[in-house]
């Protein structure tokens, strides 16, 4: 697993193929939160591949401005990395990963959410 303060190595982090429409369905289930991140420039690891091994989006949130990388690990859990635009890792999930219902909240806590927001 890549470590904080390293440049992200997508080959080292990637494990399983992802089905991007399923990932987007997770984000669409909490669309307003997703939009609050200022998402721009989404990218699969390899363009025009139906099942890439990574999804990257550029965000411009209150706490984090840079990239969010999402990988599917061997346990079918998500590994998430927050990096600068120079791809230096600032934060990441722990070794276990995130379940699908934890993904949006974990990213939102680190990208945008402030205490004054209510759900």
Image: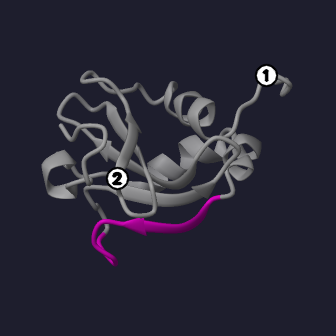
Q: Quadrant of residue 62?
A: top right
Q: State the separation of the CA atoms marked 1 and 2.
A: 27 Å
Q: Does residue 49 lie above or below 39 as drawn?
A: below
Dot 2 falls on a residue whose secondary structure is: loop
Quadrant in the picture for the N terminus: top left
Point out residue 38 in the picture as x, y percentages from the top left corner: 69, 57
Q: Is residue 13 magenta?
A: no
Image color mode: one colour
Image spot of residue 95 (x, y percent):
24, 24
Task: Kindly state the secondary structure of the residue where label 1 is placed.
Answer: loop
Image coords of residue 47 (percent x, y): 33, 76
Which residue, as the protein is rendered here, is positioned at the far front?
Answer: 5
Q: Is residue 110 above or below residue 25?
A: above
Residue lying at 82% horizontally and 24% vertically, measured from the top left? 119
Vertical placement of residue 94 versus 74, above or below? above
For label 2, the residue is: 88
Rendered residue at 13%/49% (across/down): 12
Of 78 and 113, the residue lying toward us: 113
Q: Residue at x 68, y 39 (%)?
A: 112
Give residue 63's mark. none
Q: Can you name the residue that lies furthest to the bottom here?
A: 48
- Mark 1 neighbour density, 10 Å: few (under 14) some (14–19) many (20 or more): few
Q: Which residues are magenta?
A: 39-49
Between residue 34 and residue 63, name the one nearer to us.
Answer: 63
Residue 11 is left or right of residue 102, and the answer is left
Disc 2 packing (10 Å; few <14; some 14–19; many ≥20)? some
Residue occupied by mark 1: 115
> Which mark lies nearer to you, 1 or 2?
2
């Amino acid at each position: 697993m890549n470590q904080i303060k390293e440049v992200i190595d997508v080959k080292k982090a990637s494990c399983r193929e992802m089905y991007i429409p399923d990932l987007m369905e997770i984000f669409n289930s909490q669309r307003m939160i997703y939009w609050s991140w200022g998402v721009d420039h989404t990218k699969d690891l390899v363009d025009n591949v139906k099942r890439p091994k990574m999804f990257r989006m550029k965000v411009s949130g209150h706490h984090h401005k840079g990239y969010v990388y999402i990988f599917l690990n061997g346990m079918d859990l998500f590994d998430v990395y927050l990096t600068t635009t120079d791809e230096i890792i600032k934060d990441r999930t722990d070794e276990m990963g995130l379940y699908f219902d934890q993904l949006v909240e974990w990213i939102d806590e680190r990208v945008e959410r402030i205490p004054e927001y209510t759900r």
